[in-house]
Structures are given as structure tokens and as C-alpha cells.
Image (cartoon, grey):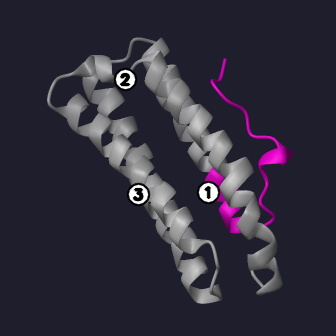
């Protein structure tokens, strides 16, 4: 059973961003399933690396749109991205250095809750702005 499920309430109204968010939900679920399934350290590490890489790429895409369109809340939004990136890179670093317990249900619930809150809160706010600038 997945940790989280994409639903239309998570749509920001920008197709490429919605697809990114669906992929992030999928990657969080993949990592959760691997943890629940008792997969080995290397397999979990590979999934975690993919999640980190995709998250960084996604944040860069959003921030590029902010810059191109003059999004007024860009600075605060970028700070949220930087804070999560720092936390996720810390988990990744600890995991790679042998602290495999860092990938706990607590961490997975944090990722889930952060992603849902961020998408339905901060990300939803920029949807109308980007739409008005022709990004749909």
C-alpha cells in the first residue's frame, strides 16, 4: 500500500509541474515500499539518490519559472526549497555514511507531510500567477 496518493487537490494547474509532483509522489512511495520490503542498503541508497536528484531538478524548474515570470513570492518559496534540500541531503549523507536507521517511518512521514503541505500550500499559490503569464 502506498504511503501517499496523488489526487486532483494537489494540482497547481501547470501541467509540467503537476507531472513533476506525480513523479515525486511515486519516488516517495518507491522508497517507502523498499523500506517496508526490507530491501538492502544499496537498493535503498539508489532510490534515495533518485529522489534527491529529482527533487533538486524539480525545485530548479519551479525557480526558473519564478525568475522568468517575476513571481512576487519567489524568495520565500526558494527558502522553503533550500530548507528541504538541506534536510534531505543530510538524511542522504547520514545514510551513505552507514546510519541506515535514518530512513525510518518518521522520515518517510516527514517527507510525505512536507510534500503535501508544500504542494497544497505554497505551490498552489503560484499556479494562477504562472497561468496568467502563459505557463499552463
Residue 136 visible at all:
no
Residue density around tag 2, few if under 14, some if 14–19, many if 20 or more, within 10 Å: some
Q: Which of 134 and 34 is in front in this view?
A: 134
For the residues labelled 3 and 2, say whether their Cβ atoms are less than 8 Å apart: no
Q: What element carries label 1?
A: helix
Question: Upstream in the sequence, badge 1 or badge 2?
Answer: 1
As drawn, the label of residue 103 is 2
* Residue at the (67%, 57%) spot, across then down: 122
Q: Which of marks 1 and 2 is in front?
A: 2
Q: Is mark 2 on a helix, strand or loop?
A: loop
Q: What element carries label 3?
A: helix
* Residue at the (59%, 33%) spot, across then down: 112
Give the spatial CA distance, label 1 vs label 2: 23 Å
Give the spatial CA distance, label 1 vs label 3: 18 Å
Asked if residue 41 is positioned above or below residue 131 in the image, the reply reads above
Question: Looking at the picture, how far across and down is residue 59, in whole percent?
Answer: 50, 63
Where the N terminus falls, by quadrant?
A: top right
- The residue labelled by disc 3 is 82
Question: Looking at the picture, how far across and down is residue 97, in whole percent?
Answer: 14, 30
Question: Looking at the picture, how far across and down is residue 14, in whole percent?
Answer: 76, 68
- The residue labelled by disc 1 is 20
* Residue at the (41%, 51%) spot, across then down: 83
Q: In this view, does 133 lie to the left or right of 49?
A: right
Q: What stretch is highlighted in magenta?
A: 1-21
Amino acid at each position: 500500500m502506498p504511503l501517499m496518493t496523488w489526487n486532483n487537490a494537489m494540482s497547481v494547474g501547470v501541467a509540467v509541474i503537476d507531472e513533476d509532483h506525480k513523479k515525486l509522489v511515486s519516488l516517495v512511495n518507491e522508497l517507502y515500499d523498499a523500506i517496508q520490503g526490507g530491501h538492502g542498503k544499496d537498493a535503498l541508497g539508489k532510490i534515495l539518490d533518485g529522489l534527491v536528484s529529482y527533487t533538486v531538478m524539480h525545485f530548479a524548474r519551479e525557480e526558473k519559472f519564478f525568475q522568468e515570470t517575476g513571481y512576487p513570492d519567489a524568495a520565500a518559496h526558494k527558502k522553503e526549497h533550500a530548507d528541504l534540500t538541506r534536510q534531505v541531503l543530510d538524511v542522504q549523507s547520514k545514510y551513505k555514511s552507514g546510519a541506515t536507521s535514518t530512513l525510518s517511518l518518521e522520515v518517510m512521514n516527514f517527507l510525505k507531510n512536507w510534500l503535501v503541505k508544500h504542494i497544497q500550500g505554497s505551490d498552489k499559490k503560484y499556479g494562477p500567477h504562472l497561468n496568467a503569464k502563459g505557463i499552463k
